[in-house]
Amino acid sequence: MRGRNALTEPVTVLVLMLMFGFAVYSLVYEGGEAEKRLSAEKSARMGARVAGSYVKVRLRQNDAADRISVEPNGLNGGDSIVIRNRFPEDPESGYDAWIYWADGELREVLAAPGETPAWEGANVIAKTGGFSAVMKDGAVSYDAGNAGVVGPPDTVSLRSAAEAGGR
């Protein structure tokens, strides 16, 4: 009888140690997964804020008559904000800046006036979940991948549209 009791204690200790080890492993694994989810959400929020802020600044910087429009891009058919930069001394010269979304990134590319941009030469602004824009009644409403992440889509009322309507 004594032999059985002597074997029971080490087996019980071994089982308890295995259970404790499994519990610690599970806790560490789940903690790592939670950290990955939090990090991904934080990156999505940061990308949406950077993209939204960039678009808002570019719209306000270039708020002049007939300089801003929303057009479909030739790359993927999505929305693009097109900013026409012309030199006053030579209106035929200058460049167009296209802000568009492709492959999970908000991008900006420059092109000659009226020309199709070389899409592969674009600069990455931020990683976002998408981009859409609408121009209506002198305002540009856009979602730079932030709807549901950092709030509703943004709208920038163009002063140049209000000034043109007041003349």
Image (spheres, grey):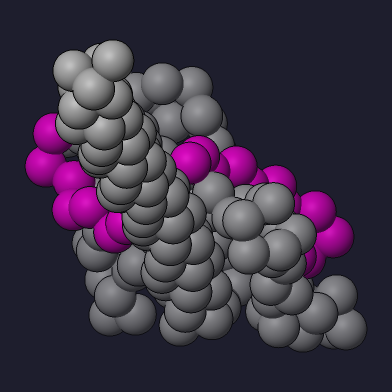
Give the residues drawn in magenta, as a range.
120-139
Whether residue 149 sits left or right of residue 83 in the image: it is right
Q: Residue 68 location, x and y as percent? A: 54, 61
Task: Quadrant for the C terminus, please.
Answer: bottom right
Q: Quadrant of residue 44?
A: bottom left
**Res 22 visible:** no
Residue at the image position 28 percent from the left and 15 percent from the top: 1
In the displayed structure, would residue 51 be above or below residue 124? Answer: below
Q: Residue 41 location, x and y as percent? A: 47, 54
Q: In which quarter of the image is residue 163?
A: bottom right
Whether residue 158 sits left or right of residue 112 in the image: it is right
In the displayed structure, would residue 42 be above or below residue 36? Answer: below
**Viewer-proximal residue among 55 and 74:** 55
**Viewer-proximal residue among 36 and 126:** 36
In the displayed structure, would residue 5 be above or below residue 29? Answer: above
Residue at the image position 71 percent from the left and 63 percent from the top: 151
**Res 156 visible:** yes
Residue at the image position 88 percent from the left and 83 percent from the top: 166
Q: Residue 160 location, x and y as percent? A: 67, 79
Asked if residue 101 is among those painted magenta in the image, a careful observer would answer no
Asked if residue 124 is among those painted magenta in the image, a careful observer would answer yes
Residue positioned most to the front: 1
**Viewer-proximal residue among 43 and 26:** 26
Residue at the image position 13 percent from the left and 34 percent from the top: 120
In the displayed structure, would residue 119 be above or below residue 51? Answer: above
Q: How many marks?
A: 0
